[in-house]
Amino acid sequence: MPASTFLPTFSVCILTCDHPEGLQRALQSVAESTMPPHQLIVTDDSSGYATREMMRRDYPDITYLEGPRRSGAANRNRSLRAATGSHVLFLDDWTLLGPTFLQQMTECIADDHIRRATAGCATPLILTGTEVCQGQPGRPRKPAFLGDPTQDYRRGERLSSVLLHSAVFPRELFEHVHFDEQLAGGYDEFELTGRAVQELGYRIELVTSAVNQRLPATRPAARAERAGPACEAARLYVACQRYRRGHRRPVKAALFLLLALPHALGRDLRTAGARGAGDFYATAGCLWQLLRGPRTELGERAGTAGLGTPLPRD
């Protein structure tokens, strides 16, 4: 296909869990997009049947999948197996698609395709937009030394992370990597984009004018998923892997663990007193399981795990 005629097609995958009202709002925002998606997929991790009944009654033409009900990563991996577009956007039932978001992403991808064809550059591209939540703008943040995503990127700095619900991925990326279902707290997103940039040579570019709206999550599970030993272990694991993939890999990874583990212990003790020692022990145990596990195989299994029999609803 000539470069000038290339247009991407988008599979919009919406994760939902016990929030049919939010799902309705998300679906309405997609319907109001100035550019309709090629495909719309809803993957449902709900514990009841209200969402399924709503989808069958009100949205019979939209692809509806039973989710694996294990994690957001497992849900996304499930939806990927059904995606057919050239690019994939992941939303959830707390996100509203911006009216011109897909149109702006289409223009950026088409322009990049022309540049790559002209210059002979084959480096694939991931695009990330921005978001607004209760009037506050949000952009991708980069991890600090200890793995917390708390730092702003400097102007011109190479991006290695995205805002997941405002990011467009080439579907071909997921032929090589998947969301790691063993990582809690959303750190599977950082692991995936880190591997895409450091191992597979992908570029990440920011499109500041492409904005989605993020609604404040009030579900207790949504707030709790970024806390606890499993989340802390995921943060440490992803940071360690980032240093392992970088320059002078063994030295940086070893130095990171020597500094990060005492820091984690100190933080737990300051936060919870003597009980913090137990929290640290749980974190260290989770981290050990992540470090000793066959991560590549786990990632590959993640892509097919979502096709298994879902866990029974209560």
Image (cartoon, rainbow, N blue to C red):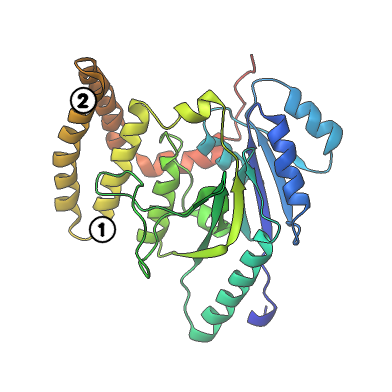
Of residue 246 and residue 214, the one placed in the foreground of this image is 214
> Looking at the picture, which amino acid does disc 2 mark?
Arg
Secondary element under disc 1, as helix, strand or loop, is: loop
- Hey, which quadrant is residue 117 in on the image? bottom right
Lateral position of residue 32 relative to residue 94, left or right: right
Judged left or right of residue 159, residue 49 is right
Q: Name the residue under label 2.
A: 270
Which of the labelled discs sits on residue 7, or is there none?
none
User: CB under 8 Å between callouts 1 and 2?
Assistant: no
Please identify the residue farthest to the bottom as the structure is shown. 118
The residue sitting at 58% across, 27% down in the picture is 69
> Residue at (17%, 58%) from the top-left corner?
248
Residue 252, compared with residue 4, is above or below; it is above
* Quadrant that contains the C terminus: top right
Marks 1 and 2, how far apart at CA? 32 Å
In front here: 96 or 286?
Answer: 96
Name which of mark 1 and mark 2 comes first in the sequence. Answer: 1
- The answer to whether any part of residue 205 appears in the image is yes
Quarter of the picture containing the N terminus is bottom right
Q: What residue type is labelled 1?
A: Gly
Name the residue that disc number 1 marks: 246
The structure residue drawn at horizontal position 68% and vertical position 70%, both measured from the top left corner, is: 7
Image point 58% across, 35% down: which residue?
Answer: 306
Crowd tier of the residue under label 2, counting other residues whose Cα lies within 10 Å: few below 14, some 14–19, many 20 or above: few
Q: Where is residue 146 in the image (x, y as percent from the top left)?
A: 25, 44
Can you tell which of label 1 and label 2 is closer to the viewer?
2
Horizontally, residue 104 falls left or right of residue 128, namely right
Q: Position of residue 207 (x, y in %)?
A: 54, 65
**Residue 186 placed where, x, y %?**
45, 39
Does residue 84 appear in the picture of this structure?
no
Mark 1 closeness class: few <14, some 14–19, many ≥20 residues within 10 Å = few
Picture layout, residue 106 above or below residue 57: below
